[in-house]
Image (cartoon, coloured by chain):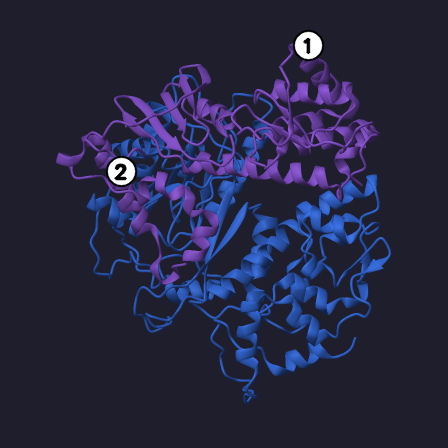
Chain colours: A purple, B blue
Amino acid sequence: MSRRPDVKNAADAALTYRYDGSFEGFLCCVFESYTSHEIPTAIIGPDAPEGSLFDVKEISTDEEHAARVARSIPVRISPAADDLLRHAFLTCLPEKELVMLRFLQQGYRYGARFLSFAGNEEVWRLTEAVKRLLHEAHLLKGFIRFSDQSGVLVTTIGPKNFVLPFLAHHFAARFPEEHILIYDEIHHAALVYRPYESAIIPMDDFRAAPPDEEERKFRALWRSFYDTIEIRPRHNEKCRMTLMPKRYWRYMTEFTKDAPPEMARIGTGA
Amino acid sequence: MEKLRILSDAAKYDVACTSSGAQKSARRGGIGSAEAVGICHSFAGDGRCISLLKVLQTNACVYDCAYCVNRRSNDTRRASFAPRELAELTIAFYRRNYIEGLFLSSGVSGTPDAATETMIETLRILREEYRFSGYIHAKAIPGADAALVRRLGMLADRLSVNIELPSGASLQRLAPDKTKAAILGPMGLIQGGIHESRDLVRFRHAPKFAPAGQSTQMIVGATNESDRQILTLTSALYTRYQLKRVFYSAYIPVNEARALPPVGTPPPLWREHRLYQADWLLRFYGFSSEELFDKTEGRLHPYLDPKCHWALRHREIFPMEVNRAPYELLLRVPGVGVKSAWRITRARRAAALTWDALAKIGVVTKRARHFLIANGKRYFDAPAANEELLLDLMSPRERTLYRQETAPVRQLSLFEEEIPTLSPVERKELSCLAAPM
């Protein structure tokens, strides 16, 4: 079902688009593909290594072009398709830009009913990727462990997908009076919140200060609770790992140890 | 530190840890929100979700229920939380995002009223002084005054009373201090409270009584009620008392008592698993408890999930065309869940569904392939014989266990009380399954 619109020079050359990595930038790639009647074989971000074998076309971000494409999606396909694309952009799906471009090409052709094509490759891949994104965001709402660092709640996470936008709303609704910093060490960005406003900012590095005495006390209490609550005759390691994948463990209080107080200057981060 | 260990150790046999059913945000100046879907904050080594700080206010108890770790005659260490101390701990854990809220239960030190009052004070400090709007699940104590249960319900999101044992007779034998009436009394009271408060929703600021509903729990395997008895009771609880959840707890012997399985008996985990599967069928799939059993059978098939078992007994309605079958029937197809059934009804409006599309929708084709036709196409040319199908519907582990139990021809004893854990399938039942329809 993945037929593509007629394009003059499709696939007669390996063509690469390079864009600035923003959603608007991606929309401009879509614009370019349509106005130049060509389909790129790769769309890469600004940090991707230079592949000299291919033609690389630099796509600069033009607000007006981006806005034109953005306007067309909810109208010519559907608002749900618009949501799906915006969410898909935050996922870690490999070559997501190409899949999204192919999604748009077919969406423009079939209109609103395109999203319910259950067997369509692009619809399926994007839906699955978004499902995983939302799932990871949901898991992290629970798995995040804050440390109280002189009144500010801080933590580090290492998610596969870019989940900070989803966490922002959740923690703002939960802790309206707190100051919060969530550092995403994979995407080098941080969510910062202070009463009634939040922002997601780029951040290269963040190290939490060593825990103070009170913080150590509550961490120890939590670990003791965690160990006690298990019913030993029902131990089930596989079940635990399915529900709470191991890649999250190293950020979680229950699986980390605090250095003894005199060595505490090294700290444990999470 | 020691106190938390004692009081969480004493509370851990309570199964419920769900934080679902309420949706709210913190008020300005307050703390805490709840999401309707619930959030798990961690998973213990036994794979159970940890969502709430599950503790007892005190584990001192005047009752002497045979199955309970905290019974009067047990020689364990006793401790209790002062209301303020527990409220502070809850908030400290909550701020660090360790927990979704509090699950508070209590032993009965003194009278049921006094115990309830201490719990109320803890919740009052949380709600009023900390302006905490996170999730609170409180356990109503059988025998407490109606006015106090009412107050507790105004402070908590969910209230529950444990039925503990699935029949009045067992209750009398093992929990002589509790009666069926003492348990069902507060349950009715809670239901009344929830009802009343639903009527009040028209007034936006009317206080809500246990907005996330009530739940209960039954111990499975301590006494000899059959699966059929348990599920009939469950189904009555859902309809008559409008419970949100019934939990089952495979009995882990913690006390030596003549009337109970000896300490060291493994908990009947498979049986518990089957009961939960059946419970889901009751709540989301439109099954009635009677449908899950053959005429005289008292228990669920130990090696096959109850939905597959039902389908095996009703092969006359299969295979059905996935592009035409109504939603209610799709729900009865093994391998089709609530979500995939819904997606099917939506997707087939756009285009006829093929096997490939079904897989993408999330249908478990491994099971569904025996029961569906997709756009005129069967998955197999010929339908499988019942015995073959039975084996195919099992997971590898179930199959291994099933083969172990059925391989040697065992002498059939009709009068022997079977141990509820993984009890062998009687060959009679098998032969009737394998017979041509």
Residue A270 lies, with reference to residue B186, above or below; the image says: above
Q: To which quarter of the image does residue A31 belong?
A: top right
Given the current orientation, which residue lies at the most extreme right position?
Answer: B376
| Numbered badge on residue A64 | 1
Q: Position of residue B411 (x, y in %)?
A: 54, 89
Answer yes or no: is residue A219 visible: yes
Output the chain of dot 1.
Answer: A
Labels 1 and 2: the sequence-earlier one: 1
Please identify the quadrant where the C terminus of chain B is shown: bottom right
Residue pictured at 59% horizontal, 60% vertical: B232
Look at the numbered disc 2 and give the secondary structure of its residue.
helix
Residue A219, labelled with which disc?
2
- The residue mark sitting in front, 1 or 2, is 1
Lateral position of residue B158 relative to residue B369, left or right: left
- Nearest the viewer among B209 and A185 is A185
Relative horizontal placement of residue B330, taking residue B78 as reference (left or right): right
Residue B126 picture location, percent across and down: 34, 29
**Do the dots labelled 1 and 2 sit on one chain?**
yes
Q: Position of residue B327 (x, y in %)?
A: 76, 48
Q: Is residue A243 above or below residue B372?
A: above
Q: Which amino acid does label 2 sit on?
A: Arg
Q: Is mark 1 on a helix, strand or loop?
A: helix
Query: What residue is drawn where x is 23% and y is 31%?
Result: A211
Frontmost residue, B340 versus B252: B340
Q: In which quarter of the image is the N terminus of chain B?
A: top left
Q: Decide if residue B437 is on the left or right side of residue B26.
A: right
Question: Chain letter of disc 2?
Answer: A
